[in-house]
Image (cartoon, rainbow, N blue to C red):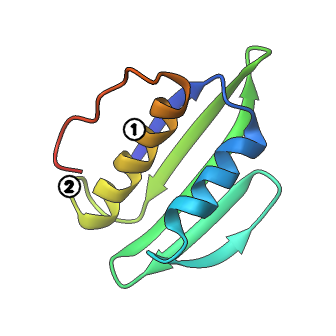
Amino acid sequence: MQYFHRTSLPLDDVLAEADSFFRGRLETSSVDKRKRTYSGSMGTIDITVRAEGGHYTLVTVATDRVGESEIDKLGKRFMALVHGRVDANHALRGSY
C-alpha cells in the first residue's frame, strides 16, 4: 500500500520524526538522504520525502503488505502524527 501526505514540515524534520517513531518498533534496514526503510516481523515500510511546491514536503509511506495489515496501520499512524506536528488541533481518528 502507498499513502501520501503533503506537509509544511521540512524534509529533515519528517525523517527525524520517522526515526523517533519507528525506533523500538522496527529495525532500521536502510538510511538514505531522503528515504528510510524499517522492517520487522510484521513487514517492511519505506518513508520517502521530497520537496514539493516550494516550501512543502511530500511524504510517501509504502508498505509491502495489503491495506489494514499491522504495518499498514503503523504507517497511517505515522502520517497522522506528522499531520499533528503542523496542526495542533488535528485529532487522531481510527484504530491505527
Name the secondary structure under disc 1: helix
Please give the residue where the numbered disc 2 appears in the rendered image: 68
Residue 84 placed where, x, y %?
45, 32
Q: Is residue 65 above or below residue 62?
A: below
Please give the residue where the numbered disc 1 appears in the rendered image: 80
Considering depth in this image, is 15 or 61 the residue closer to the camera? 15
Q: Is residue 94 left or right of residue 21?
A: left
The answer to which quarter of the image holds residue 41 is bottom left
Name the secondary structure under disc 2: loop
**What's the amino acid at mark 2?**
Glu
User: Nearer the observer, disc 2 or disc 1?
Assistant: 1
Q: Residues under labels 2 and 1: Cα distance?
A: 15 Å
Residue 11 placed where, x, y %?
74, 39
Residue 93 placed where, x, y %?
21, 35
The answer to which quarter of the image holds residue 63 is bottom left
Considering depth in this image, is 66 or 76 the residue closer to the camera? 76
Which residue does the image show at 26% across and 59% down from the upper left?
66
Which residue does the image show at 76% across and 29% down from the upper left?
51
Q: Is residue 6 left or right of residue 25?
A: right
Which residue does the image show at 28% across and 55% down from the upper left?
73
**What's the amino acid at mark 1?**
Ala
